[in-house]
Image (cartoon, rainbow, N blue to C red):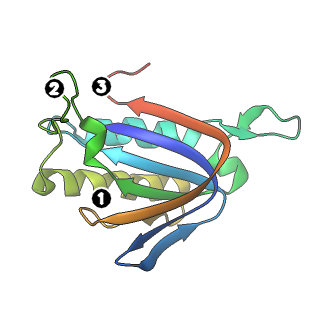
Amino acid sequence: MRLVIQRVLEAQVSIDGKMYAKIKQGLLIFIGIEDSDSSNDIDYLASKVCNLRIFSDLDGKMNLNLRDTGGEILVISQFTLHAKTKKGNRPSFIRAAKPEYAIPIYNGFCTELETLLQKQIQTGEFGAEMKVNLVNDGPVTILMDSKHKQ
């Protein structure tokens, strides 16, 4: 499972020209799921996201996490995070999980975030053509991969 996490002042996702979900300060998370992902990947990354200290304290140092700030989360599915570009110029998405496998993993990740944070999170619609607007804060962008715990 791969995540691109962006610290935002606000973010929203629109589907078919209509606003679908919106958050204020918090994290916009793009998630890519592959066939080998499991509940272990969900648990690992959801915990890391909730405890990630990337919000500034009173001294301007990144010492605070989502719980400390009361920040919100918007999760967007993005199979292109598993693009392979080694051969040729057209990306291959062979490692991205098919929807019948990816949707339960996606839903499980979102549910685990809600459980850990004890609050509702916002999501896009899995598989939909979405337009995402955001105001980056920093900018702070973090990449995480449950298979490469670095």
Asked whether 2 or 113 is in front, the reply is 2
Q: Which residue occupies 39% across, 35% down?
A: 44
In the picture, measured across the screen, residue 97 lies left or right of residue 5, that is left
Amino acid under disc 3: Lys
Find the distance from the CA under tag 1 to the CA under tag 2.
Answer: 34 Å
Asked whether disc 2 touches disc 3, contact meaning CB atoms under 8 Å apart, the reply is no
**Looking at the image, which is closer to me, 47 or 81?**
81
Alpha-carbon distance for marks 1 and 3? 19 Å
Mark toward the viewer: 1 or 2: 2
Q: Residue at x 34, y 30 (%)?
A: 146
Q: Which residue is mark 2?
A: 88
Question: On the picture, is 62 further left or further right than 31?
Answer: right
- Provide the secondary structure element on which disc 3 rests: loop
Name the spot of residue 4 as percent of width and height, x first: 44, 40
Q: Image height check: is 27 above or below 89?
A: below
Q: Which residue is mark 3?
A: 147
Please give left or right for residue 1 compared with residue 115 in the image: left
Image spot of residue 2 (x, y percent): 34, 36
In the rendered structure, find residue 107 and report the number of the disc placed on it. 1
Disc 3 residue crowd, few under 14, some 14–19, many 20+, Cα 10 Å: few
Q: What SS does tag 1 mark?
A: helix
In three-dimensional space, the C-alpha distance between marks 2 and 3, rounded to whole angstroms, equals: 25 Å
Residue 81's image quarter? top left
Which residue in the rendered view is the most extreme toward the right? 59
